[in-house]
Amino acid sequence: MSELEVQIGRFLEELRRENVSAHTVRAYESDLRQFLEYFTPPGGSPPELRQFDSLALREWLGDLYGRRLSAVTLRRKLAALRSFFRFLVRQGLAETNLPRLLRTPRAPQTLPRVMTPEQTGNLIDKVGAEDQEQPFAARDRAIFELLYGCGLRVSELVGLNLEDLDLGTRWLRVRGKGRKERQVPFGRKAAEALERYLAVRRGRAGERGVFVNRAGGRLSDRSVRRIVKFYAGLVAGDSSLHPHSLRHAFATHLLADGADLRAIQELLGHARLSTTQKYTQVSLTELLKVYDRAHPKA
């Protein structure tokens, strides 16, 4: 096994120990395996770590451009490589983080599509309805209530432990990106949904995760995405919706009703206010649509 392959494996193990989301680990693993494959000649071995230079990395990036990958995909692959080289520098296996010298492709400025409050409420109210005869209806309803009611990332939702719930005061302890913790309130409907679910929750012995699967183990982020897609297709006829759609709706609806941008930043767990400000653009876009429809001089 080559030195590069060994260090990629060690890097991925470190990510898992740091509780980086499973989705991110899978994406980084795929990107770095492709990087390894690019530099491994048929029947040969890739270069030693200290043999990599800026020119080699630019050739690799040029190959990605040649395959007409989207800017978003290119940015993710660069992020994976930069994170890997940062690990190598810490281990004393590389002198500098060479990928940081590569120019980051500009991603198109696209605004997230956001459901209206009425659409969101209609979707959530019908999740787990009796006529659907779903085996885990109470669990699924609680998942939707927390994703929208608290604006959680899917990794934060599946990472919730029983001791993180305070049903009396309606607060959650949430572990976000970079292992940062924050306190998030939740409303009456979410509390009621949680109480109904916890009354029938069947976790195996010692399982601390709030949301569990049919075997009693912690629910995975992939399973939550599948659950959201199922109900979105069944109720709203739109299976393109995903857990982050509910997070977008949470932030946009708060902003539209006058919530302070910095308060929304705290609730979402954004490190930078600029990340939260994209919801301002969503609200302005909706405002312009209302103006165009309603103003006689529009």
Image (spheres, rainbow, N blue to C red):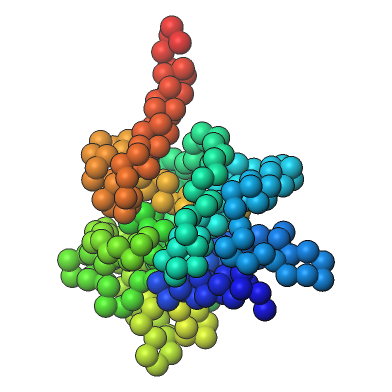
Q: Compared with residue 39, is residue 91 higher up or lower down, i.e. above or below?
A: below
Residue 153 appears at what percent x and percent y?
A: 41, 58
Relative side of 273 to 238, left or right: left
Q: How many marks?
A: 0
In the current view of this chain or complex, which residue is farthest to the left? 169
Relative side of 231 to 18, left or right: right
The answer to whether residue 60 shows anywhere in this view is: yes
In the current view of this chain or complex, which residue is farthest to the right? 42
The answer to whether residue 127 shows anywhere in this view is: no
Residue 20 appears at what percent x and percent y?
A: 44, 67
Q: Compared with residue 56, is residue 194 higher up or lower down, i.e. above or below?
A: below
Residue at 36% over, 54% down: 151
Residue 97 appears at what percent x and percent y?
A: 48, 55
Quadrant where the C terminus is found in the figure: top left
Give the camera-side residue of 295 and 182.
182
Quadrant where the N terminus is found in the figure: bottom right
In the current view of this chain or complex, which residue is farthest to the bottom? 205
Residue at 36% over, 62% down: 178
Residue at 49% over, 48% down: 100
Residue 109 appears at what percent x and percent y?
A: 51, 34
Give the camera-side residue of 110 and 82.
82
Residue at 41% over, 18% down: 291
Give the camera-side residue of 48 and 116.
48
Give the camera-side residue of 80 and 90.
90
The image quarter in which residue 198 lies? bottom left
